[in-house]
Image (cartoon, coloured by chain):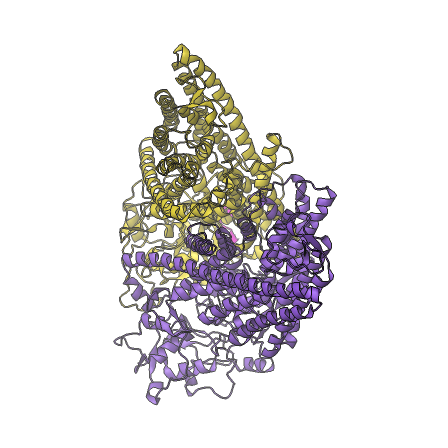
Chain colours: A yellow, B purple
Amino acid sequence: MDTETETLMNGQRLKPNQGLPSNSADGAIIYDSSHFQLRSRDRHVSYGSINGAVPLPENNREPEMPGRQSVTFRRLPPEMLTTLSSQFESLDYEPWESRVFKEEYSKKTPSSLTKQGVTRWIVVFFIGVCTALIACAIDICVVEITKLKYGFLKKYIDKCVTENCLYIPYLQWLGISCGFALIASLLVTYGEPVAAGSGIPLVKCYLNGINVHRLHRLKTLFVKAAGVTCSVLGGLAVGKEGPMVHSGAAVAAGLSQGKTTSLGFDFGILKEFRCDQEKRDFVTGGAAAGVAAAFGAPVGGVLFSLEEGSSFWNQNMTWRIFFCSMVSAFTLNVVLSAYHGQIGQLAYDGLLNFGKFPDIPFTLLELPIFIGMGIIGGLIGALFNQMNYHISVFRRRFIFSRWAKVLEVIVVCCVTVTAGFVMIYCVNDCKPLGAKDDIDFPIQMFCEDGQFNAVAAMWFQTPEASVRALFHDQPGTHNPLSVGLFFITYVFLACWTYGLSISSGIFIPALLSGAAWGRLVGLGLYRLTEGAAWADPGKYALIGAASQLGGIARVTLSLAVILIETTGNLSLGLGLMLTLLTAKLVGDCFNAGIYDMNVQLAGLPMLPWSSPPLCHGTQARDIMSKPVVVLKEVERVSTILSVLEETRHQGFPVIFEDRFAGPQGKQTSFGMLRGLILRSQLKILLKEKAFCSSPTGSASQPPVSLETFRMYYPRYPTFQGMHFTEEERSSYLDLRPYLNPTPYTVPLHASLPRTFQLFRALGLRHLIVTDDNNEVVGMITRKTLARYRARICCGTIDFVELPLGGHGVQL
Amino acid sequence: MDTETETLMNGQRLKPNQGLPSNSADGAIIYDSSHFQLRSRDRHVSYGSINGAVPLPENNREPEMPGRQSVTFRRLPPEMLTTLSSQFESLDYEPWESRVFKEEYSKKTPSSLTKQGVTRWIVVFFIGVCTALIACAIDICVVEITKLKYGFLKKYIDKCVTENCLYIPYLQWLGISCGFALIASLLVTYGEPVAAGSGIPLVKCYLNGINVHRLHRLKTLFVKAAGVTCSVLGGLAVGKEGPMVHSGAAVAAGLSQGKTTSLGFDFGILKEFRCDQEKRDFVTGGAAAGVAAAFGAPVGGVLFSLEEGSSFWNQNMTWRIFFCSMVSAFTLNVVLSAYHGQIGQLAYDGLLNFGKFPDIPFTLLELPIFIGMGIIGGLIGALFNQMNYHISVFRRRFIFSRWAKVLEVIVVCCVTVTAGFVMIYCVNDCKPLGAKDDIDFPIQMFCEDGQFNAVAAMWFQTPEASVRALFHDQPGTHNPLSVGLFFITYVFLACWTYGLSISSGIFIPALLSGAAWGRLVGLGLYRLTEGAAWADPGKYALIGAASQLGGIARVTLSLAVILIETTGNLSLGLGLMLTLLTAKLVGDCFNAGIYDMNVQLAGLPMLPWSSPPLCHGTQARDIMSKPVVVLKEVERVSTILSVLEETRHQGFPVIFEDRFAGPQGKQTSFGMLRGLILRSQLKILLKEKAFCSSPTGSASQPPVSLETFRMYYPRYPTFQGMHFTEEERSSYLDLRPYLNPTPYTVPLHASLPRTFQLFRALGLRHLIVTDDNNEVVGMITRKTLARYRARICCGTIDFVELPLGGHGVQL
């Protein structure tokens, strides 16, 4: 983990009477010993307490506010499960308008702008193509190797049923599955832990502005793609669709930068896109392309990116993202069509093809049934999430070493295979061979000749194929008892599996278990109505699948469109929408969606869409962190070095030289605001040794160019390898050309909602709190705002303040 | 027109040596006589000129910026076509966090929040239902009366063809059509001019934050609905779908407020939603419901609202808007199914049902054809928009009296009918009666028995039915020559019609003319390939229709989804998307989409998604308006009265009493910022006579409650009927409980992009420019920012500054 992580704990590593550099007389580091006392008792509490007595700056004329009522945020104990991780930095989504930037930008010509615009479209095109190609590769691998696996097993089962040696195919099944699961687990656990899970929560956080380390590396992409292939081949209750979102995002981040850090290769192109904001827009497109490729749903991809992924949106992005999705769906379609021997046709719509539903109209009378199923889905989803939460908590407590994680995967794999085998062995659900069209490996087991075991058919194929079977099989194909048993087993397995240290998606397991209970409902209706045309079990399986996934992931609009596009059926659209919305509303009464729950468990400081309610009485001065470490416009190199070494802040307000307030007993203001400079920029300036000898700065010296800053992006120099002579240490660094002269500020008495709104809408990283004289009094960052939460439950609101902790990502 | 419109022209109506109230010694009104001189020469120029010498506040330490390069904005002459209208106020999208607000808000309980949330969903439900019912009413009226009309005409034509008296049915047709057109035109011109056109540009502007007067009144809704019915019945080249967006928006605005001003009735409910921000969110939902009802496309509705309408978006809104769209589509479906005799079925999908397309797969080889058609559509669309622009300009110059507008409608109606009649008369395109299924009124004309005139079939039905015919008729049904002739005539008519003083939509005319040329392409391919299965003229008619509408309206994603939902065909989705995106990109090379062009012509100060490029050298101080009229915390009533009477500003910065800077020769700073108060709030305080006798304010007096403020929303008291005694005039008004204590500010040297970004992302109305000491130096509003435009054309950028003009809306 990078040690240069951002933290709000001002001067956390400063100790009152030691380590303060000799240049403290310069006043560059201002601290308040009373604060350090507080901090030494509880290293995570460094804020002025809400409702507590925060001294007002003396020169601040805070208007009297009779009866200012602020809510009380209950400070949670620094437990493992309720902390915000301090390991995550923020991204710079705000354009950095330093003088250097403006000078370079003003040299741009209209034609270079046009060129940049066209390049964006070209990059987006290739993002779509590459994402689709990865999806194709995964799909083809899975399909081909699955055929080999189950073909091999079928041969032995057919042989052993008669020879009474069924333990042999069982052990073979176990061996093959565990082998794949082991590879999947090793890849993730030892290769790239950030590739675990579906990656959707992490991409969501990235788009929200959190810098998740190694999320978009080439290595991560490889581990993700290879890992999910192995997970599916291992027969685990996982899907390969969720991880496609992460893969698409990684492809986008990589392609748009024109370089790869994993291979250490720089193509020297696309340099103008090497900043967080441009990268974010491409990643949004990549995530959409991933969904589009996974489901063959270009519109669904755009909507998923919009509804679930993105935190920032604008109209121009819509069109590019749409194009990206479209190209991705096109490419996948062309390649898969060619693979299946229909070159030039556009017949294969996605990784996941649920088969075309015929037009199934529905009547008004069915609406209550759909709503009812939505309620069931919401309830099961909420229960699923709750169970998964407790499993994750258990995992966090007891399974933290790498080998234990790998072992757990093997155990789950064994349980899955055993459950499948026991069900096939015990449930003797025999159907005639003609009852089902597209069965690849009919297992006879103890059935009579000309029949096959219907339960085995559910297990002896990819989960996608099982979903398709539940959607399209004739009413008589499945025995209600075996479907019910399958549902219970599968839900339990899926819940246990999601969160293991492998690449895995929740889409298919949710759809499959939902399709199972949905089909049960359909079968019930079919029998009740004695085979009425509308009571098609396949239709109800689809509604059930939607309802279950809606209840777990709380996705509505995009999921409805994805299912419409995947099944090629529009007539059921309204029914699906109603079910999904019901499932979401019901589920939301109990807990958060599984992705949000993951984000919360990992302590990721994601900012929601709006601030906690009823908090207008809480002001910026109640939540800001102080004291603030500030720098002067022209600052001594040694001071900068010690500030960088002794704090972990990522941004430093720069103040006017002559209004610099020296250290006093109870310091409340830290000088008049001149601008803001980032740690990364300081490090580059130090690395480039852009020093001058005079404390008034130097205009003659050519400043470090924007080109140089961009060259270092996004991995900035570290202090290792930086050596400074005594002369260099005593020279000065003129920050004026590089600082952002107009950072966003809020007044001391701005309310929490207004502060939040400003921060969230503009995607800020640092928000400086100033008093009435425009002097710096505090600092607000993402973690300041993310820690104040309101939990609405049963008509009461629980206002909580999360402590900061040090744990890393565990998704 | 309300005279209290917002304007930026500071002190426009102040004259240097007269009208200044006696309390000017209080310094409440600060003005700069040099500015008035400037203004008297050119009343529209009141800003510090860009690149000109704006004096810096003396106390401001602007950091030196060597070589600050700012682009030069060419100031356009105040011509009719390039001015921004000063007639439009802005909406208050920013929550007003005054002390009164905070005190009321802090009394809220969690359960009242829950209740409010549930109420929102209920309101949204009724918005969906009501929008759909209006759509049903319009549809049923149009269908029934059209049947009567053409049935009547057919009788006479059939009779007169043999009796050689065809002038009689011609005159009858003319009479009936002109009658309806006259009603449509009178309703709009004399009833409610704001109901003219499709209303989409106006709704878009409203959602952007512009207060368009009377846009959402009950009367407007009635005129819109009745007007569009009459326009369609008048046989004009208009559609009824576009106006549904406006109708939906009006329904949403009305229902969400729980009162109607037109009828003067207040239900006393939903008071918590009576603010601009809440209303906006409902209106976004209403617009989506309108599209959903018009096209039976719930997902398309959401996407249209997102892509074309909305300027602000968040995740919670997505779900409510989705629900609203869904309810609307459901209701329409249920009602229309019942109307067509299929109670309880859900068979009718929208006002516009283009009929189900069978699955038409396409091959890779067709992609170039789709792209080619996209290019053609983009070119035709750009030409159409350009023609329409010139027609609008002509109209603006020469047709401005009401009777002339009505007369023009009649002329267009006569030309339309005559064109139709001449085509039917001259083009003898006879087809056997069995060649076409759903023809209501087959006209024989000069055809032989058992045949009908195919051209007459195109004119003797609603445009929707013609589109359906072009999509679904067998290859041999239409003669290429007559389709070509029809296309040319119809495009010309549509271009002339759009912009008339009637309610009219552009969707159907664009789709119809596009379907015509698309079918021609299809027929050509059909003949070239000698009837290959893929060369289905109906399919190409659909592609052509999409391409044409894409080229005119520049809508991509939502239109693709709407067409998918309307035709019930998913397989062509990718083809449609490709065509639409091409059409948009090609069209954008030449001019703006028709809606944006309308907005520009009307001088509406809409803020685009991003600021003009390359403007980082332009600073807030270059564009801000000054001097600023400020008030003190406790201000004399007479001063407030004269400020309100003599300026037209909508917001006034409030400054600290003791830091108030008196009038000096060259004033640059106007005191230290304390807050902001709105004109509307001042008027309510005056009306409520919330005065106190002491200049230090009064804490004992109970302040005017938020309830009272809300009671006046959105029509604030006027000075008529307000009388003040001499004693009242000399008393004081304590503004402190009512002002917004933390208005957003920017520093003087903030760049234009940063200023724009802050303003746009937060939906601000007033942005105060402060110097380094937090003193007020200038003001930035919507019109300040909207006037700076960059037109990119042929590799060069033309930076222009629009002047402000006084013209009103003309869409």
Q: Is residue A249 visible?
A: no
Task: Tell me: A567 left or right of A344.
Answer: left
The image position of residue B746, as x and y in percent, is: 48, 64
Q: Is residue A292 visible?
A: yes
Name the residue at 28% across, 57% down.
Answer: B111
B617 up-or-down from A589: above or below? below
The residue nearer to you, when weighing B531 against B755, is B531
A50 up-or-down from A178: above or below? below
The image position of residue A469, as x and y in percent, is: 45, 31
Outermost residue toward the top in this view: A163
Magenta run includes residue B173: no
Span of residues in magenta: A726-734
The residue nearer to you, when weighing B127 against A800, is B127
The image position of residue A516, as x and y in percent, is: 39, 34
Magenta run includes residue A730: yes
The residue nearer to you, when weighing B696 against B166, is B166
The residue nearer to you, when weighing A111 against B431, is B431
The image position of residue B757, as x and y in percent, is: 51, 60
Q: Indicate the quadrant where residue B269 lies.
A: bottom left
